Image (cartoon, rainbow, N blue to C red):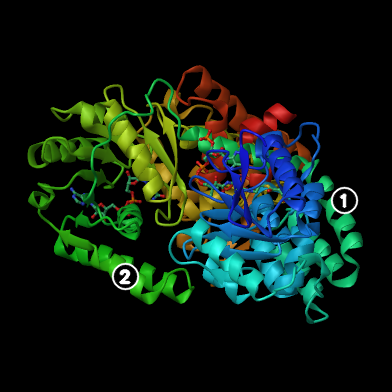
Amino acid sequence: MSSTVSYSLQDNIGVINVNNPPVNALSHAVRQGLLDAITTAQSDASEAVVIVCEGRTFIAGADITEFGKPLQSPWLPELLDTIEASTKLVVAAIHGTALGGGFETALAAHYRCAIPSAKVGFPEVKLGLLPGAGGTQRTPRLAGVKASLDLITTGAPITAGQAEKIGLIDKIIDGDLQEGAINWVKELIADGVPIRRSSEQAVPDYEASIFDDYRAALEKRARGQIAPARIVSAVEAAATSTFEDGLAVERELFMECMGSSQSAGMRHLFFAERQASKIDGLAKDTPKRPVASVGIIGGGTMGGGIAMSFANAGIPVTMIEISDEALQRGLSIIERNYAGSVKRGKISEDKAVACRALISGSTDYAALADVDMVVEAVFEDPDLKKKIFTQLDAVCKLGAILATNTSYQDVNAIAAATSRPEDVIGMHFFSPAHIMKLLEVVRGEKTADDVLATVMALAKKIRKVAVVSGVCYGFIGNRMLRPYGKTAQLLLLEGASPQQVDAAMETWGMAMGPMRVFDLAGLDIGYSARKALTDEQKGDPRSYRVPDLLVEAGRLGQKSGAGFYAYDDKRRAIPDPAVDELIAAAAAEFGMERREISDDEIVDRLISALVDEGRKILDEGIAQRSSDIDVVYIYGYGFPVSRGGPMFYADQQ
Ligand code: 3HC
Ligand code: NAI
């Protein structure tokens, strides 16, 4: 066989065993090994074959590291045709996650069994792809068109139980999987159960309008992405043509997606996200401190969401506020958020109740004496933060990790307010903190290695994507946002309108254009922050003149009903001629001649502003690697996934 696939006879059953850590991806060696094993089984003493995997999971997909390289035979569709054509019964035995090409392998077997904790699915869409080895053709023949479209267009895995209900799994095995699978196959043989090839099954009836309905819905849900509509076409081909013809359609669409810049960007993000968790110079086996309880200071916008993030992962939280009223307000916002999540079907009522019960509150810092970690989320006031850290130093037990959620302040100065700067770190969550995936972990000059390692591991536990940043004003994300925002202001004075700038960026793929972001955040925040700065710190006056004038005219953004736009009672942004006049007047103040600006120029200049700052951040060692910056922008700032992040995009250009 090969070093990654072994084959042995156990009684009258041929057992093919895949062992390619960490996730049994279908590398060339695995494909060759599987082909050799299934070929051997055709002419040996076996009566049936079981495919099973070692380690933590069944095959988790094609080997993504081989994408974009020359194909090496046997390629997956060929291998799966051979497995399906086997004249001996083939059963796949699933544990962990059977994903993508891994699940396609299971669907090419004649029957499938799984342990209850197993999950199956097609995450290809998250890589800008569609299943390329018969997944779009075999799944509808077993589960019907609707279930297949749901499974393949969302990319979300389903449990073995759910898969059994829709016909993708035939048997749930309790206890030892391999033993259970072998016993089940013996029963199938004894009962004379015939070989059942997925490709030979008829697609069950479906609603005629279903494909157009999905296309329309996906155009909204996955705006700008090319893979989802192609998935619908491939499933449509399964329903309306022969298996062979459908397979040819799938292949053509798969190759088209594989060659797209979108998929390249999304594959880049897949590895960038995993790379981000690795820290240069920090040994993998760095010890971690136990974090079984957390204190949060401040129950405002951020504190509440941060508390929920920990509670959702089963970690009890004590929230400290300045007064009983503030505490009650904070706790009731948390309750409302949980109720909202239940209403939107995000979590069950029971889970919401259990999570809420993990959050308690106090107005007394002494309640933090025994917690393993504290996250401070009070107003963005450096003196207040330092005062609080001095207080924490006095009440918290030795070894407790002391984190600040500051957006901009100097983590080293905050650490210096304690007698234990090695225990201090930045944990910069994004709003709403219980939903946004990004966490910037700010490593102070004196932050201890085990504190950093603990926070990185904890981030995974609370389901955040963590990126390490050094200390500087605004860390990675907000620091890059400054030149981006300033460039957007200059574009207005030079001749663009707020709606043109936003439309150009949103059409390009940003979740929200910069002017709408300013309005959402509130223009008064930047206005008051500027008050504390010298002219030199404020920089080019043209870069803040318009927002200053807006605030002085009482236009603070969405919250006051007007900012760069007017807002109706449904908070819809409406272009406002008064703003155009205000911009024209500001341009005149600086003697600027306004001109026509193209959408391409807007996109180029704004993205260049991000990238230039990103390069400085790399040069200064604030970010470890360029792909970390991409992760920050995609998970924290609505940068389009399909463009792979600002630095990846710039490299591609
Ligand atoms: N190919 C190559 N490497 C892979 C891989 C894959 N399909 N899946 C995971 N890895 C690597 C990761 O890069 C990581 O490497 P590292 O340790 O060097 O950073 C390592 O395996 C472990 O991965 P995770 O950190 O993600 O481990 P988890 O335990 O958190 O998650 C998992 C396991 C759920 C399997 C997750 O890795 C995952 O979702 N993998 C991707 C699955 C996927 O997208 N499959 C479809 C591929 S496309 C396809 O199959 C096309 C086909 O239709 C033709
Ligand atoms: P907020 O104003 O909504 O909440 C701050 C809370 O802290 C208030 O409820 C206040 O009563 C409480 N507080 C003040 N002093 C306190 C003290 N001494 N002890 C206990 N509680 C005290 O502010 P928000 O938006 O939650 O911001 C908090 C921190 O998070 C800031 O440092 C901010 O820069 C940062 N941040 C904010 C983001 C946002 O989008 N709002 C995003 C990321 C970080």
Query: SS of the residue at dot 2?
Result: helix
Mark pair 2, 1: CA separation: 50 Å
Q: Position of residue 279 (x, y in %)?
A: 43, 27
Residue at the image position 18 percent from the left and 39 percent from the top: 400
How packed mark 1 is, by other alpha carbons closer than 10 Å (few <14, some 14-19, many 20 or more), is: some
Could you tell which of marks 2 and 1 lies nearer the N-terminus?
1
Q: Name the amino acid, label 1.
A: Glu
Q: Give the quarter of the image for residue 300.
A: bottom left
Tell me if I can see residue 276 in this picture: yes
Mark 2 vs ligand 2: CB below 8 Å: no
**Residues packed near mark 2 inside 10 Å, few (<14), some (14 to 19) or many (20 plus):** some
Is residue 53 depicted above or below 651 in this figure?
A: below
In the figure, 261 relative to 523: above or below?
Answer: above
The N terminus, quarter of image = top right
Amino acid type of the residue that numbered disc 2 sits on in the rendered structure = Glu
From the viewer's perspective, is 583 left or right of 448?
Answer: right
Q: Nearer the viewer, residue 372 or 548?
A: 372
